[in-house]
Amino acid sequence: MEKRPSHNLPEEELALIASYLSGEMPPDQLDAFERRLSEEPGFRSKVAEVKALLIGIREANLEEQLDAYHAEIGQSKERATVGRRLIPYRVGWVAASVALLVLAGIWWIWFSTPSSERLYHAYFVPDVGLPVEMGSADTLRYLFYDGMISYKEGAYNDALKKWHSVAKASGTTDTLQYYMGIAYMELGDMDRAKEQLMEVAGDRNASYHKEATWYLALCYLHTGQRKNAVSLLERIAGDERAQELLKQLH
């Protein structure tokens, strides 16, 4: 069982995370924040939990239920009326910080009509990558996994350089195109990301067909092409993430 968080987020850190998730973090803070994300697994967990909470709150329409919710927190530690799909042990320290969102003036950001870019930042979580198998005598296989290490370290340009070498030498695969697409998304190059993901999303027999369709939809969302995003999401409407995002887009 994963260890239960034992502390609340300071108001300043919560405000910082919320500004990142809303896409409104100043450029001079963004590099340092993303470095911290790549280097601190515990911090990544905090960001993911805050994001999950905010999505849950939006779906629960807590503008009308906020007072009742606060009363519920005071009366019972065993029940939570917010974001019922959130994993229970995660709710504790984050839920206690909801009031800080109000105090920090960030509540409006998440309850105003969601823009495409804000929705993108709310739902985009990069694939964690494949387990790395090193020591292979196959040079190209070794280079692929060496690129996977770079990808996991957040060195996306380095990963892409290695993966392009693999593709040039042996041709592309759906796995290669899928991870190259996500690497381009991390770099903010949605056009190249689309090029890589489109083929995989278009092949129903591809190993990463559903995943590529999800990320391709997010690419279109990022560029403001909502109709294209909706069309792709409807192809994988059985996916829980797709269902949630479709509700936001309709």
Image (cartoon, grey):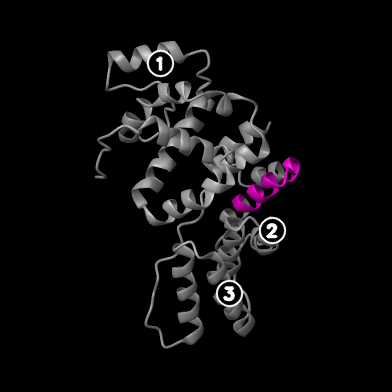
* Above or below, 79 relative to 50: above
Label 3 neighbourhood size at 10 Å, few (<14), some (14-19), many (20+)?
few
For the record, the magenta segment spans 214-228
What's the amino acid at mark 3?
Lys
- Residue at x 56%, y 37% (from the top left corner): 22
Q: Which residue is mark 2?
A: 194
In this orientation, does residue 238 appear? no
Q: Is residue 219 magenta?
A: yes
What's the amino acid at mark 2?
Lys
Q: Secondary structure at mark 2?
A: helix
* Above or below, 232 relative to 150: above
Q: Secondary structure at mark 1?
A: helix
Q: Earlier in the sequence, mark 1 or mark 3?
A: 1
Picture coordinates of residue 80 (x, y %)? Answer: 36, 22
Q: CA distance from mark 2 to mark 1?
A: 41 Å
Q: Which residue is mark 1?
A: 69
Picture coordinates of residue 208 (x, y %)? Answer: 56, 60
Q: Earlier in the sequence, mark 3 or mark 2?
A: 3
Q: Which mark is residue 123?
A: none
Q: Which mark is residue 161?
A: 3
91, 243: nearer the viewer: 91
Q: Secondary structure at mark 3?
A: helix
Residue 35 picture quarter? bottom left
Question: Would you say the magenta stretch is mainly helix, strand or loop?
Answer: helix
Image quarter (top left, top right, bottom left or bottom right) of the N terminus: top left
Depth check, mark 1 against mark 3: the one in front is 3
Q: Is residue 17 left or right of residue 25?
A: left
Q: Is residue 177 left or right of residue 142?
A: right
* Above or below, 133 relative to 184: below
